[in-house]
Image (spheres, grey):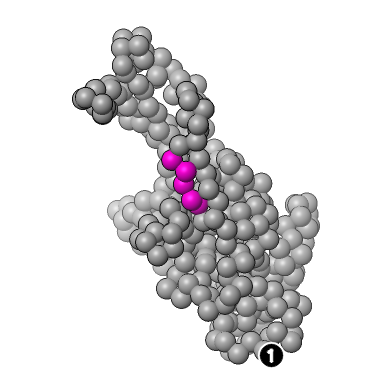
Amino acid sequence: MKENKKVMKMENITLKGKVIISGVIELLTGLHIGGLKETLKIGGTDDPVIKDAFGRIYIPGSSLKGKIRCLLEKSMGKGKVKVVIKVKKEIKEGDKSRYEVKEDKEETYELKDFNTDIVDKLIEEYKSKGYTEDKGYSIESHITALPCSCGDCVICKIFGPHDSKKIEEPRRVVFRDAYLVKEINDNEKNRNNSNNEVIEIGEKKYKILDENDEELNEYLEIKPENIIDRVKGVAQHPRFIERVSAGAKFYFEIVFNVYKKEDKELLKELITGMKLLEDDYLGGSGSRGYGKIKFENLKIVNRPKEYYEGNEKAEKVTDVKDLDELKNLNKLEEKIKEIWNY
Ligand SMILES: [Zn+2]
């Protein structure tokens, strides 16, 4: 019976239109999103940034989507947290030593009920059982956030439930990969005889850089990082991390599918998630200051069903300088109202 009900619900939902949010992501600090390890042999860095087959540097749509989803879930107390505790014992074999897992435990909590005291308490429990450092034991803890999979909340409606069996309504958003671009002026545009795609947003024009563009290297930097040996105070294992340098710009596009009149609220939540990302970080090593970003030169376009049926005039566009412009909820409401006609 329940299955039937679900099918009915999906059938009642038809696409009313698409709202496309596009613009530029500017890097305020260097960004590292790891690419394939195989590049190591060619690139000569231990951890290169991700590039496609044409040598174009990009931020995968899935990274952007995952990060925004995670930040919204945190802010709403949605989702779950998985805690894994491992008790290990050091076993010495000659000059080498290895670790053997003696006990492990996995527990899942609702994000709203979780705090790190829970982990400390679990560790203390093991210590009181005699698994102490002086006896050669070490206790490791791993905390992983699990996305919501209820199928019915704001998060699941926007991003889709984590568990696809729980789909109640079609997922609203599609995040396209965001490519590294360079802002160009009109002269450069005419001179641009390469096949690079030119993107126009408002007054500004950008071209996507690929491996044939020498400028591409201007945006890459190799940053050595060391792990300091706490006892000897010397640098060990220097690693070479490739980063896209601060100031680089990426063209992004998010497609929001409109199924219901009330989806306006979901669109507002999505934009709130983008604001949360600006105060967080993208990619790896955020705690070391990587990946601070800013959305700017945004264009929000609404294309209702009639647009796709041939009525080009049905399209509505509004420009937004940056997300600071939408900080105020009334202003956000006002901007969306300019294009929303459902
Ligand atoms: Zn949910």
Q: Is residue 30 above or below residue 317?
A: above
Residue drawn 36% across the image and 51% down it = 163
Residue 163 seen in this snapshot: yes
Classify mark 1: helix, strand or loop: helix
Residue found at the very far left of the displayed protein: 93
- Residue 34 image point, x, y percent: 46, 55
Query: Is residue 66 left or right of 278 when viewed as pictured?
Result: left
Query: Is residue 301 left or right of 74 when viewed as pictured?
Result: right
When asked about the image quadrant of residue 100, the answer is top left
Identity of the amino acid at label 1? Answer: Asn
- Residue 17 image point, x, y percent: 57, 73
Q: Is residue 208 above or below residue 135?
A: below
Query: Is residue 174 left or right of 102 when viewed as pictured?
Result: right
Residue drawn 21% across the image and 25% down it = 93
Residue 78 seen in this snapshot: no
Instruction: Quarter of the image for the C terminus: give it.
Output: bottom right
Q: Which stretch is magenta?
A: 237-241
Specify whether residue 168 is painted magenta: no
